[in-house]
Image (spheres, rainbow, N blue to C red):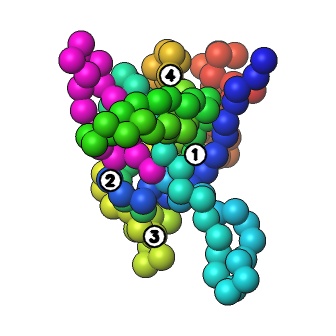
């Protein structure tokens, strides 16, 4: 069987981050996802979807995303049943995020049409279970000869 969801949309409100009684981080948020067509009134039609993220993914979303941020999510669909405060049985359907990604650059977010705070976001994404990205090795300073050609120390300096 397969249960895979990939979706992109904008956060409707700031993510709500909290801790479970066992100390696990969990963040819940709602995104608006455009259906790509107009309704009978000529307005864009959007679906509003609930998303939950756990542990490091939750912390990443809580730290770097806010209302209006464009986000891409891959995960799975989950339904659960609960009782509300009045004792009425309810059912919730939500996306459980495995990986989340930024979908706009800082520059786009800072533009007049952007809805996010660019200072709060580094470029990148968080893939649950992935090892931290390796840091690039220090590059040697190129040395040019009198004709403007770059001199290389050894074959390890070649860019290919």
User: Which residue does the numbered mark 2 point to in the structure image?
Assistant: 14
- Residue 95 vs 137, above or below: the answer is below
Main SS of residues in magenta: strand
Q: Residues within 10 Å of mark 1 (few under 14, many from 20)?
A: some
* Image mark for residue 42: none
18 relative to 96 in the view: left or right = left
User: Which residue does the numbered mark 3 point to in the structure image?
Assistant: 114
Q: Which residue shows up at 40% across the image and 46% down it?
A: 29
**Is-magenta flag for residue 156?**
no
Q: Residues within 10 Å of mark 3 (few under 14, many from 20)?
A: some
Please give the range of residues in magenta.
Answer: 15-30
Place of residue 25 in the rendered image (x, y in percent of width and height, measured from the top left): 30, 25
Place of residue 63 in the rendered image (x, y in percent of width and height, measured from the top left): 30, 41
User: Which residue does the numbered mark 4 point to in the structure image?
Assistant: 128
Q: Are marks 4 and 2 in contact (CB under 8 Å)?
A: no
The disc, 3 or 2, on the residue closer to the chain's N-terminal end is: 2
Name the secondary structure under disc 3: loop
């Amino acid at each position: 069987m397969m249960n895979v969801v990939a979706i992109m949309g904008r956060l409707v409100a700031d993510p709500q981050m909290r801790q479970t009684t066992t100390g696990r981080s969990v963040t819940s948020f709602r995104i608006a996802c455009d259906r790509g067509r107009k309704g009978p009134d000529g307005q864009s039609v959007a679906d509003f979807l609930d998303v939950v993220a756990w542990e490091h993914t939750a912390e990443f979303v809580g730290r770097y995303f806010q209302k209006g941020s464009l986000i891409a999510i891959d995960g799975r669909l989950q339904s659960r049943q609960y009782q509300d405060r009045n004792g009425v049985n309810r059912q919730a359907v939500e996306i459980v995020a495995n990986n989340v990604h930024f979908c706009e650059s800082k520059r786009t977010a800072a533009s007049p049409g952007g809805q996010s705070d660019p200072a709060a976001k580094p470029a990148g994404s968080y893939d649950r279970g992935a090892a931290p990205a390796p840091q690039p090795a220090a590059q040697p300073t190129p040395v040019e000869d009198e004709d403007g050609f770059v001199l290389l120390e050894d074959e390890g300096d070649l860019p290919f």
